[in-house]
Image: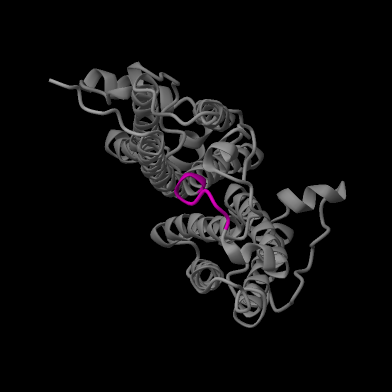
Amino acid sequence: MPSAPLPSAPLRDAARAAEAGAAERAIARWLLLVAAMVWIMVALGGATRLTGSGLSIMEWAPLSGTLPPLSEAEWNRLYELYKTIPQYELVNRGFGLEGFKQIFWLEWVHRFWGRLIGLAYLLPLLWFWWRGRIPAGLGPRLLLLLALGGMQGVVGWIMVASGFEPDRTTVSPYRLVVHLGFALALYGALLWTALSLLRPSAPATAAAGSALRRWVWATAGLAALTMLAGGFVAGIRAGLDYNTFPLMDGRLVPQGYWWLEPAWRNLTENVAAVQFNHRLLATLTLLAAAGTAYVALRGGAARGGGTGDAALLRRAALGLLGAVTLQFGLGVATLLLVVPVWLGTLHQAVAVLVLTMALVALHALRPARGSAAALATKAGAGP
């Protein structure tokens, strides 16, 4: 019998393109899942900080620490170890084994979730690699994301270890900000890579959106500075003072802003200055987001050539304004209510929503750079 005719070259090319597109979408969905897990991790980190749970586990055991204590003897050993640090002596002295278990479990869940993130990233990565489904040029970026995730674990332990120093009952605010910054950078890189796989071509209106792009960049930059400033607010517990808004102790700029010497220490160690800076940056971010929405509705996005693309840009700008407005309101409420744990945790979680909307808007406004594979070749490039 005569053999079946081979598919024509155009059909073979179309089949290969369809297979490559399916692989890119699968990788994008996986990266979005991991990004969502990082988002939850940021919220868990906020809860451990607000409850003072982060110092309850004084051993860094990446493998053996996966399991919680399984015997009363092990619980007592860990409790006795915890009793040697200043936090126990100065904050939790005499709260007993049951009190220790309460803070232990939250920190254990936080670390366990970090291990799950590692597995959720590593195992699918190996599977995609083994099946040859990673697009050309994307491999280096995926390995870079893996290294960044591993580095975040190391940075987290370095941060925790700072809380064991004499006369310190919390971790170093500087290391806390570095840890938070690493988490946000990892989340942003995961999200940006996934978006580049799902939408490899820049929208038609991006070329006409230079003014809007500047506004979004300004909003994103201010939001990032606000988040880092919020890390210092958390690190020195500045939210427990000046619990009024918009004035601070009856003044717009609090008395004692430049109290510390040298002057730069006020930006990170002075409660009045740190909280005022966070308020100021949050307000500027809100104004920039409002300006972004205005430009999107009245300016470049509304005049864009593609109706669907213009609507995408408008939705991204309005979504960014909505996220910033929600975060601003939560920040004020957290301050006025003197930082309840649930509200402080929600405030930290919604910060990631602000970052998400900023990256979505920036991605929609990016200049055209070709295919997803070409984008992926910039392995070290971030958002």
Query: Looking at the rendering, in which quadrant would you find the N terminus?
Result: top left
Q: Where residue 7 sits in the image (x, y, percent)?
A: 31, 32
Q: Is residue 368 magenta?
A: no
Can the viewer see residue 164? no
* Magenta part of the chain: 196-202
Q: Where residue 227 sits in the image (x, y, percent)?
A: 61, 54
Q: Is residue 199 magenta?
A: yes
Q: Nearer the viewer, residue 290 or 152?
A: 290
**Which quadrant holds residue 95?**
top left
Q: Residue at x 48, y 62 (%)?
A: 339
Q: Where residue 376 sits in the image (x, y, percent)?
A: 56, 36
Q: Nearer the viewer, residue 364 or 143?
A: 364
Determine whether 99 is above or below 229 in the image.
Answer: above
Q: Nearer the viewer, residue 13 or 111?
A: 13
Q: Is residue 169 left or right of residue 35?
A: right
Residue found at the far front of this picture: 2
Q: Nearer the viewer, residue 352 or 283?
A: 352
Q: Is residue 97 left or right of residue 208?
A: left
Determine whether 296 is above or below 75 in the image.
Answer: below
Q: Is residue 129 left or right of residue 149?
A: left
**Which quadrant holds residue 300?**
bottom right
Q: How many marks?
A: 0
Residue found at the far left of this picture: 1
Can the viewer see residue 69? yes
Q: Residue at x 43, y 48 (%)?
A: 39
Q: Residue at x 56, y 70 (%)?
A: 317
Q: Where residue 246 sits in the image (x, y, percent)?
A: 64, 77
Residue found at the far right of this picture: 262
Determine whether 166 is above or below 332 in the image.
Answer: above
Determine whether 358 is above or below 260 in the image.
Answer: below
